[in-house]
Amino acid sequence: MTPNDFRKQFQHEQLPSVISFTGDEDFVAEQTITALENSVDKNFRSWDFVRANYDNQNIREILADAATLSFNANRRFVIIDNPLFLTTKGSLEKSEETLLLNYLSHPEPENTLIFNAVGLTLDRRKKIVKNLANHAENIDFQPLSQREIVQVTKKRFNEAHISIADNELSYYVQRLGLNLRLIINNLSKLIMYGQNHLITKGSIDALVTPELTESAFDLVEALNKKQTEKALEIYKNLLDQGQAAIRINALLLSQYRLLLQAKSLSLSDDNLARKLHIHPYRAKLANQFASLEYFSEISNSYLNLADIDLKLKSTNLDPNLLFEIFVSRKI
């Protein structure tokens, strides 16, 4: 089930007793949880909306909450955040697993228990995961497409009665790497600015710090296009913004690893995104950049960055000098 289908369902008060949230779009998932909370009567919200973190509570306590009825005969929501026992990183004791399996088979029909596993990779070999798949309604929070993100963002501008051209709007969402949480969180700056000024690419650059992954892609693009000065400027700006040289290099290393994968797999943007579990926008950029170089060139860049990583960790060499040497070898 899609998040939109689920919203329609709970608006008509037609909710299953057990639900699982999966996928990678945590911002939309969090908005959905907020909408669920707001659907509960304010006078009973502290009782009928329970959010339990598995890090702090055991499954026995959570299931006890899930089995407890509402004071005013309404539906009670119990949300389990961070259910690591569904992944390879955690597990339940045998007695706890038995309790949970019994609850999944016979849930309290007047309540809704939600497993919020967004951002987690489920271990589908586990008995508890297989049972959850059979007994729970799954809501899949997949990353929004660039078109959907632009639509959501444009709606926010329209609601604030702020005008922004389509080109500038696209530039804004791309500058933040199509990270919906960052895009929404940075909107207030542009909305305030747009009350008295025309929003341009220049004003976006001045007001919004680009997402670090996006800056790494900018660096890769400049390097591929042999734009030495631009590459050095981007690197210097990142250092001036307080980004650690070792972190910038690690991100570049990650980007070139992605280019190696894109070059070797030779898949379409969508198939590459599914294969590597990345946003389609990142897959699109990876294929674009990988097409500009031979495999050996990308491989050499990756090895040179790995060498820089080692030097940054084991020597006191100037990061700027190391990057300049990398650029000279690259270009």
Image (tube, grey):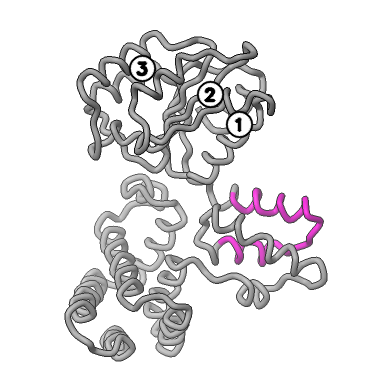
Q: Secondary structure at mark 1?
A: helix
Position in image of residue 251 (x %, y %): 34, 68
Looking at the rendered structure, the kind of residue marked 2 is Phe
Would you place residue 158 above or below residue 171 in this image? above
Sequence-first tag of 3 and 2 = 2
The residue depicted at 82 percent of the width and 71 percent of the height is: 196
Looking at the rendered structure, the kind of residue marked 1 is Glu
Give the residue number, with chain letter if any, for mark 3: 134
Magenta stretch contains residue 167: yes
Give the residue number, with chain letter if any, for mark 2: 77
Q: Quadrant of residue 198?
A: bottom right
Position in image of residue 157 (x %, y %): 73, 56
Q: Secondary structure at mark 3?
A: helix
Nearest the camera: 245 or 65? 65
The residue depicted at 59 percent of the width and 32 percent of the height is: 4
Crowding around mark 1 (Cα neighbors within 10 Å: few <14, some 14 to 19, many 20+) is: some
Would you place residue 18 above or below residue 255 in this image? above
Q: Quadrant of residue 314?
A: bottom left
Position in image of residue 16 (x %, y %): 51, 16
What is the magenta range? 149-173
Calculate the distance from the C-alpha at mark 3 to the C-alpha at mark 2: 20 Å
Residue 37 image label = 1
The residue depicted at 35 percent of the width and 73 percent of the height is: 248
Q: Nearer the viewer, mark 3 or mark 2?
A: 2
